[in-house]
Image (cartoon, helix red, strand yellow):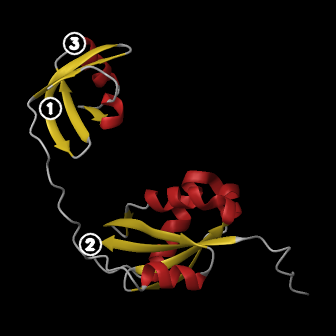
Amino acid sequence: MKILPPTLRESNRYLAISVTSEGDIPRRDLVNEILFCAATLLGDAGSSEMGIRLLSFEENKGIVQCRMDRVWETRAVLATVTSIKGMRTRIKVLGISGTVRGATEKYLLTQDINEPEPEIKRTQTIKECKMIIDVGTIFGEVVNRNNNEIDLLSEDPHSLEILNRSNTRYFGITVFDIKDKEIDL
């Protein structure tokens, strides 16, 4: 049987991943869990169309191959992997590339995963916030503020009803929500 020329082959993408877990994860268990999550999330037909393969996996870093038009579905499948053999697990996509070499050089060889993230400096302390939007006024206590994001605990009964129906605690407000709106700090 002849090999297809490159113009007729399906294009692939290569996802560089890092696995964080409570213990050591064998390659076989990781492959089984990824394929199980793909079948659960997308069904057998959907998972076979994605063409997921774990090409390499060493020291909790690896490369996952998938079809070019199924990258987002593959990312969703990797996000649904939460435990392997009873150990809590998280798979983080470091980057996506068109070649194995590119994924290895750009994301696996140059990045130290255990490097701590820089601390975010708080710019201003706010106790209460009132914001007028199209549907009405939202007011309440500011619970948390990081750079451009504010978590607001509403005191309005109508807003509390909306939050309870959606199983959330706070309104998440960003600078873009506040722009061109009235706000009292």
Q: Can you identify the residue that label 2 sits on?
A: 22
Locate residue 71 relative to residue 137 in the image: left or right.
Answer: right
Tell me the quarter of the picture where residue 61 sits: bottom left
Residue visible at 48% across and 80% down in the picture? 106
Where residue 174 sits in the image (x, y, percent)? 30, 37
Residue type beneath disc 1: Val
Where residue 135 sits in the image (x, y, percent)? 37, 13
Q: Earlier in the sequence, mark 1 or mark 2?
A: 2
What label sits on residue 184 in the rendered view? none
| Front of the two marks 1 and 3 | 1
Q: Residues within 10 Å of mark 2 (few under 14, many from 20)?
A: few
Q: Can you identify the residue that label 1 sits on?
A: 142
Q: Earlier in the sequence, mark 1 or mark 3?
A: 1
Q: Quadrant of the C terminus?
A: top left
Residue type beneath disc 3: Pro
Decide which of 147, 32 is in the foreground and name it: 147
Does residue 24 lie above or below 86 as drawn? below
- Residue 1 can be seen, yes or no: no
What label sits on residue 157 in the rendered view? 3
